[in-house]
Amino acid sequence: MQKNIFLLFLFLLCMSLSSWTPASHSDRESKYILKQIKKSITSTFSFDSFSLTQKEQLLEASPFLEAYSFYDIIVEEAPKGYVMVATAPSKTDSFEYLLLFDLNYKIKKVKVLIYRENYGGEISSKRWLSQFLQSDTDASFVYGDNISAISGATISVKSITSSINYIMDSIQKLKSQNQI
């Protein structure tokens, strides 16, 4: 009897430790995200040495954007671009993705960093994500029109599309108000 109670306790303890929220990344996830940020910046821009300075939180929470961190990419004490790590909802969990911007807030790169669902991981494809690299910063992304559907990833596709649209709309508003 005591053995069964102990095993039940151990099982419940393991289950509680495995649950977490996007805001509380494990050390392993945080290190992985930082490594991917650095790798993406060096592969997208033409500089190897840079620093990141976190910008103040300017965007309001939305159903499409659960959390985000926004950084200036600094090279020789001057901003050279921006990086945002955002959390968007998926069917039963959430996922983190990265947006790299040039100084005009044009999207230079989109990369899914952590995807936690069993299905729909195809949204991590570089080819599919390249749809968000448009020359017009005022462009809107429309699921089924200029953003292709992915079978088995409908919710995640709509989520990242809505999230990026929300971010780009918010940036345009902040630019027009001279807040960024």
Image (cartoon, rainbow, N blue to C red):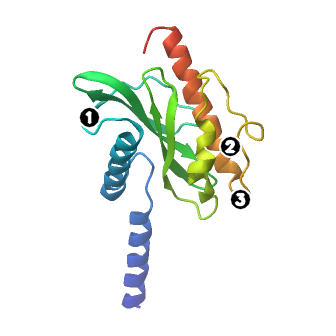
Q: Which residue is mark 2?
A: 158
Q: Which residue is mark 1?
A: 50
Q: State the CA–CA distance, disc 3 to disc 2.
A: 12 Å
Looking at the rendered structure, the secondary structure element under dot 3 is loop
Q: Residue at x 55, y 43 (%)?
A: 88
Tell us which disc is closer to us: 3 or 1: 1
Q: In which quadrant of the rendered image does the C terminus lie?
A: top left
Query: Can residue 63 be seen here?
Result: no
Q: Earlier in the sequence, mark 3 or mark 2?
A: 3
Looking at the rendered structure, the secondary structure element under dot 1 is loop
Please state if 93 lies on the left or on the right of 19 as rendered. Answer: right
Near-viewer residue (13 or 142): 142
Q: Quadrant of residue 32?
A: bottom left
Q: Residues within 10 Å of mark 1 (few under 14, many from 20)?
A: some
Task: Point out residue 61 in the picture as x, y percentages from the top left corner.
Answer: 52, 31
Near-viewer residue (36 or 90): 36
Q: Residue at x 43, y 12 (%)?
A: 179
What's under tag 2, amino acid-wise?
Lys
Q: Residue at x 45, y 48 (%)?
A: 22
Task: Point out residue 159 in the picture as x, y percentages from the top left corner.
Answer: 63, 43
Whether tag 3 and tag 2 are in contact, CB under 8 A, the answer is no
Q: Residue at x 37, y 55 (%)?
A: 29
Q: State the CA–CA distance, disc 3 to disc 1.
A: 38 Å
Q: In which quadrant of the rendered image does the N terminus lie?
A: bottom left
Task: Point out residue 102 in the picture as x, y percentages from the top left corner.
Answer: 44, 27
Q: Which residue is mark 3?
A: 152
